[in-house]
Image: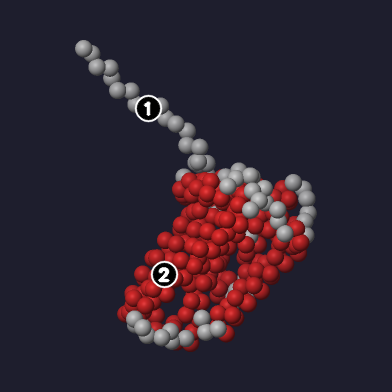
């Protein structure tokens, strides 16, 4: 009896991979900037609204004595950021069709997927709350029941003590995992639900697959997002007025290049 030779399977095309170089991320950023330049007032007004809301949230945390979760909350902003940028995606989508829209239509968006966007938003908010709770637990594991020293002393406690440095290392690692996961499930999910009739879980699963199969360019885009967000923090969130619209418009072009 002759056993036939084992034939290797035929190569299958990877439907998730686009083969884009890492430098394509800078093309998305330039396209996002061009959307701002072509019709600046709606984008900058949108960024101003995000800045004012962020400032109000920070003021509430401080006034209610919740300053111990201020830093995790600022980091968690990156988790829910794609949801708040849906109006910017809508402007870029309309801009590609040759239409000009105002701030009102950017704020009151009607996504193709309807209420599925709200479901995605709830999941992202739950993820943000989980990260904030994890941050509080990490603080308690390293400093025990010691009260939060306040914003005036926390920097010295973190950077001048061995326990503080260890907590920074662990907290950054855990926060990085949360950030990577939220980036993967949301970066294309919200634009996809704006553009197509698709449910939340399918959109988030597709977003994750697209990020994983296009890692070089998506890691570059993630680094750009992180760098510009940190720049906004350095400016006391004032930079969000320009940075948030820039990243929002740029994300739409990332979606068009990879997911659409």
Bin the neighbour count of mark 2 within 10 Å (Cα to Cα): few under 14, some 14-19, many 20 and up. some
123, above or below 204, in the image: below
Q: What is the C-alpha distance between the residues marked 1 and 2?
A: 45 Å
Split into 4 quadrants, where in the image is the C terminus?
Answer: top right
Residue at the location (57% across, 56% down)? 119
10, above or below 157, in the image: above
Residue at the location (63% across, 60% down)? 85
Bin the neighbour count of mark 1 within 10 Å (Cα to Cα): few under 14, some 14-19, many 20 and up. few
Q: Quadrant of residue 159?
A: bottom left
Q: Are marks 1 and 2 in contact (CB under 8 Å)?
A: no
Residue at the location (69% across, 70% down)? 48
Residue 40 at x, y percent in the picture = 74, 62
Residue marked by disc 1: 9
Residue at the extreme left of the image, as rendered: 1
Q: Earlier in the sequence, mark 1 or mark 2?
A: 1
Secondary structure of residue under mark 2: helix
Residue 90 at x, y percent in the picture = 69, 54
Left or right? Give the position of 146 relative to 76. left
Residue marked by disc 2: 134
Split into 4 quadrants, where in the image is the N terminus?
Answer: top left
Secondary structure of residue under mark 1: loop
Residue 56 at x, y percent in the picture = 63, 77
Left or right? Give the position of 78 relative to 195. left
Q: Quadrant of residue 26?
A: bottom right
Left or right? Give the position of 16 relative to 11. right
Is residue 200 in view?
yes
Instruction: Say which of 41 and 50 sits in front.
Output: 50
Is residue 31 in view?
no
Closer to the observer: label 1 or label 2? 2
93, above or below 244, in the image: above
Instruction: Say which of 116 and 35 sits in front.
Output: 116
């Amino acid at each position: 009896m002759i056993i036939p030779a084992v034939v290797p399977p035929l190569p299958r095309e990877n439907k998730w991979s686009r083969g884009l170089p890492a430098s394509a991320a800078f093309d998305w950023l330039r396209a996002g900037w061009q959307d701002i330049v072509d019709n600046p007032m709606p984008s900058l007004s949108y960024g101003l609204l995000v800045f004012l809301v962020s400032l109000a949230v920070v003021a509430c945390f401080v006034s209610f004595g919740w300053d111990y979760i201020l830093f995790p909350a600022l980091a968690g902003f990156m988790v829910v950021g794609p949801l708040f940028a849906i109006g910017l995606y809508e402007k870029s989508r309309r801009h590609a069709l040759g239409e000009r829209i105002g701030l009102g239509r950017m704020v009151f968006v009607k996504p193709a997927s309807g209420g599925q966007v709200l479901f995605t938003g709830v999941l992202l908010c739950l993820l943000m709350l989980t990260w904030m709770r994890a941050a509080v637990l990490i603080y308690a594991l390293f400093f025990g029941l010691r009260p939060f020293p306040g914003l005036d002393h926390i920097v010295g406690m973190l950077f001048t003590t061995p326990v503080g440095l260890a907590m920074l290392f662990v907290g950054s690692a855990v926060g990085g995992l949360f950030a990577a996961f939220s980036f993967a499930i949301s970066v294309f999910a919200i634009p996809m639900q704006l553009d197509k009739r698709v449910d939340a879980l399918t959109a988030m699963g597709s977003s994750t697959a697209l990020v994983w199969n296009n890692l070089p360019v998506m890691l570059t885009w993630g680094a750009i997002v992180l760098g510009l967000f940190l720049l906004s923090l350095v400016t006391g969130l004032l930079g969000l007025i320009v940075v948030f619209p820039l990243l929002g418009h740029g994300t739409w072009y990332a979606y068009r290049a990879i997911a659409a």
